[in-house]
Amino acid sequence: MFILNCKGKVLVLNKPMVMGIINATPDSFFEDSRKIQVEDAVEKAAQMIKEGATILDIGGQSTKPGSDTVTEDAEMDRVLPVIKAIANAFPDVYISIDTYYAAVAKAAVEAGACIVNDISGGLFDTEMIPTVASLNVPYICMHMQGTPKTMQLNPVYENVTNEVLDFFIERIAVCIEAGIKDVIVDVGFGFGKTIEHNFQLLNTLEVFKMLDKPLLAGVSRKGMVYKTLGITAAEALNGTTVLNTIALQKGATILRVHDVKEAKEAIDLLQLMDE
């Protein structure tokens, strides 16, 4: 069990939880997750909460392979109205800001977010980790090789599990030294990893429990599902549910997903196996 301090709100992770993805972007890889209009995002949030999401992850730029960088100001323009509207409509929900900019993280937390989700593990913006420490919110630290623009060109590892584990040992130490109290680990499926690397990580996911941190799994509709099956991202719900189930069996604490209902059902059914 993990107890996280989310800007004064306590989040008790005594069983796996669902994080719903809401992208305030025009170009995320899964079309149905794109929500530019604030009203649409609030409607999507309501649906996800009803279906069982505990956390909503709001992002303002696509990080799909080959994507271009969006500026801090443009990202703020996209995410802040969405965060404010969702926080106002659903004050009890936990909102995560998906950004690697420290300034965006700070503004988002001031607008109503209470978790920071950083795909760069603090390596893209040197102010990120001290900023999160000052905000006193949990930090989702993800592993990525390269940048979204370059990460899938030629990812290479001698042993992907060992190298990602070493990355987290170093990053967690940096976070703790800076004063971050709650770190969540995300191995970064699809971020600077081949399909083979992704499945090696999934197969060894239980190794990361030695870090004694909540473990987030984000496989939802990614290439490791649809490319492996020879389908599209739009057709990848069933495959996503299979891999989410495996991730749960191997120790995942949070499932980051586009489809909340199916992820919550996987959690509920597996919980019965443990009773």
Image (tube, helix red, strand yellow):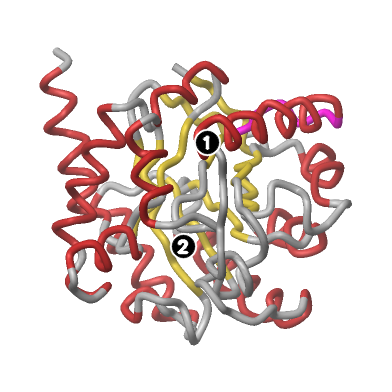
Q: Which mark is drawn over residue 248?
A: none
Pick the front one: 197 or 34: 197
Residue 100 left/right relative to 241:
right
Residue 139 left/right relative to 92:
right
Residue 53 percent location from the top left of the image: 34, 49
Please rate how many residues cluster around mark 1, counting C-alpha atoms within 10 Å: few if below 14, some from 14 to 19, many from 20: few
Residue 257 percent location from the top left of the image: 34, 55
Q: Quadrant of the C terminus?
A: top left
Q: Which residue is mark 1?
A: 159
Q: Amino acid at mark 2?
A: Ala
Q: Which residues are magenta?
A: 178-183
Q: Quadrant of the N terminus?
A: top left
- Classified by dominant secondary structure, the portion drawn in magenta counts as loop
The answer to which of marks 2 and 1 sits earlier in the sequence is 2
Mark 2 residue element: helix
Q: Which residue is mark 2?
A: 89
Residue 251 left/right relative to 88:
left
Quarter of the view holding residue 202:
top left
Residue 175 within the segment the image draws in magenta: no
* Residue occupying the point 18% across, 56% down: 239
Is 63 located above or below residue 77 in the figure? Answer: above
